[in-house]
Amino acid sequence: MTLVIKKNNIFFLFLLLPFIAMIIPAVIGYGNGNIFVMDFLAKRLMTLFVLPIIGLLLIYLIYQFVFNINKVSKLVSLYLLCWILYLISSIYRGNQLNYLLVDAFVSILPLIFYIAVFNFNFNLSHNQYLILLCLGYVLTLFNIKLQFSYFNLIAIVYVVFITKINIKNLAVFIALPFVIKNALLGKSALIMLLFLLVTLYFKKFNFISFNRKKSVTYLLILSFTVGSIFLGEYISQTGSYRHFTYFIKNANFSSLEFKDASTGNRLFEAQKVMESFKKNSFSFKLIGAGFGSTIDLSETVDATVINANSNSKKIHNIHMGFFAVLYRYGILGLIIYILYIYVILKKSIFILNKSNSIIPILSSLYLLIIVFDSLISFPHMMSNFMFWFSSAIVLFNYKKIKQNRLLHNLRY
């Protein structure tokens, strides 16, 4: 009997491995429970776990360039050309090697998933997608931070709107309040979850029945009533509640002064980026500081940043997307970032309006919340495997729907 290994199974393993990687730091108690230190190790383990498959895809790409250039799209060629330009520039600037390799790896992810979907026709089955959702759900239940940033929110709305209500799934619904509590880490998580719930509730989708929406209505009314009377202390323990109330109490919108450390640090990062941008050369303004670049944030008031980094004079990540891209990739990178956001918003909305399939629709919703999140937490987008895979799914399904419409018009 011959064992046949399908390409889709290999790529699915590619998505499963990061889940394993993110569990390891929590299991071994790495960093004494510091979520940022654990997150750092998890991302490095993810990289090691998936490098072999990424290496094979890059070898395939090089092979196509050498022997079959016609199969390489102009978009892929242009992206790879920009990537090489940034790599050479970063090496020339002498950027820190370990950060340089991380950024180069992260920046190749969009290309890898684009090739996997468009060249190898990698599409998740519903069961495979469900496995990923279940893993995200279970990890969140045990309070393990999910590397696929906010993918647990998709798991939550899947349970609320799509999972069958029966004895078999009773444990899933019992766990729901605990998963929601652990998923609501901050202000953004609450906003994104509300967006997902409202979109799926008010927009008509063929996989959500009217009766299910009625059940959700009753559930929300019951949850709000019980929560406001009996679970006030439980709700106040969520990260979203604590961060949101602290932000409101310590924000002066008239003078744009924010005393909470997280917001203050983001504004401080923006200030440092603009100072650096103004005083540097034209080449820096055009293509930025490159892969592996760092910024001096030693004067920040955010203790979390100082505690999570061994040297606060060389901080690798900048949170707000606009300033992160401007500093690392310059005006050229910023143009690409803005164009990408425009394209992905346009095509995600198209999928939400025209598609009848669960996976492309949930992928579109995931893209919308992560693009929003990237404006204030850019690393959540860049190193996020599921984000880039979802991007490729949306682009592929957009193209497929357009082609089917064209064929239909030609026939009739």
Image (spheres, rainbow, N blue to C red):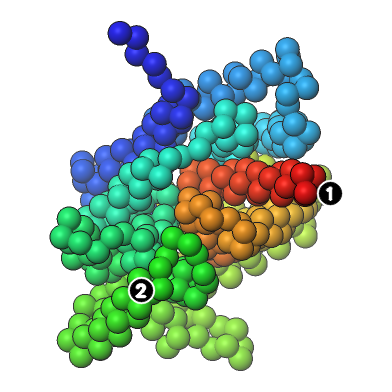
Query: Which residue is rendered at x = 58% and y = 55% of the image?
Result: 355
Query: Which residue is rendered at x = 58% and y = 70% of the image?
Result: 267
Type of the residue with mark 1: Phe
3 to 408, vertically: above or below:
above
Residue matched to label 2? 211
Callout in the foreground (1, 2) = 2
Query: Which residue is rendered at x = 65% and y = 44% of the image?
Result: 400
Query: Which residue is rendered at x = 17% and y = 55% of the image?
Result: 168
**Image coordinates for residue 332, horizontal then vertical, percent:** 78, 49
- Which of the marked residues, 1 or 2, is nearer the chain's N terminus? 2
71 to 262, vertically: above or below:
above
Q: Secondary structure at mark 1?
A: helix
- Distance from disc 1 to disc 2, alpha carbons, whole Å, reads 60 Å
Is 377 left, or right, of 180 in this rendering?
right
**Image coordinates for residue 345, horizontal then vertical, percent:** 65, 60
Q: Nearer the viewer, residue 73 or 349?
A: 349
**Residue 192 visible (yes or no):** no
**Image coordinates for residue 35, horizontal then vertical, percent:** 32, 55
Question: Mark on residue 26?
Answer: none
**Residue 12 visible (yes or no):** yes
Check the image and name the residue furthest to the top: 1
